[in-house]
Image (cartoon, rainbow, N blue to C red):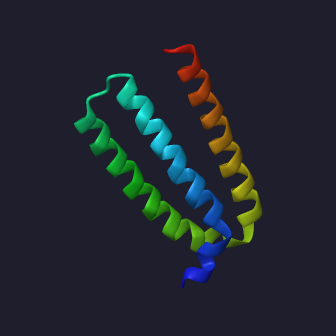
Amino acid sequence: MLEQYLPFVGLIVFGNIENLVLSSQGVVAGVNPVKLGIASLICVSLWLIIGTFGTQLLIDYVDFIDFIGGLAIFILGLQAMFVSIRGE
């Protein structure tokens, strides 16, 4: 069963790191931590459901999905760094 997820390991690892970065941005910005935690749990649960069923349907497009997902993580990471450097 885990073999079908192996092509997505990079997205899983770096996506989780990006989630931590975005959550820390929310805490630094003064967002209510309870609301942030609830929203994070909802998003992670939805992402798990989408990922589980999406993997079965779209395994043929793994290279394209990895590229788009990696690009999104990279862009979000750059945005997070720019915002933190500027001190906003």
Vertical relation: 75 (above or below) 46:
above
Vertical relation: 20 (above or below) 85:
below
Depth order, front residue of 33/45: 33
Furthest residue in direction bottom, as rendered = 1
Furthest residue in direction left, as rendered = 34
Count up the numbered dots.
0
Which of the 4 image quadrants contains residue 46? bottom left
Image location of residue 37, percent across then percent down? 29, 43
Q: Quadrant of the N terminus?
A: bottom right
Image location of residue 61, percent across then percent down? 73, 65
Depth order, front residue of 36/47: 36
Image location of residue 23, percent across then percent down? 41, 38
**Lateral position of residue 31 relative to residue 9, left or right:** left
**Lateral position of residue 78 relative to residue 54, left or right:** right
Which of the 4 image quadrants contains residue 72? top right
Q: Residue at x 41, y 54 (%)?
A: 44
Image location of residue 26, percent across then percent down? 39, 30
Q: Residue at x 76, y 62 (%)?
A: 63
Vertical relation: 38 (above or below) 49:
above
Q: Residue at x 51, y 69 (%)?
A: 53
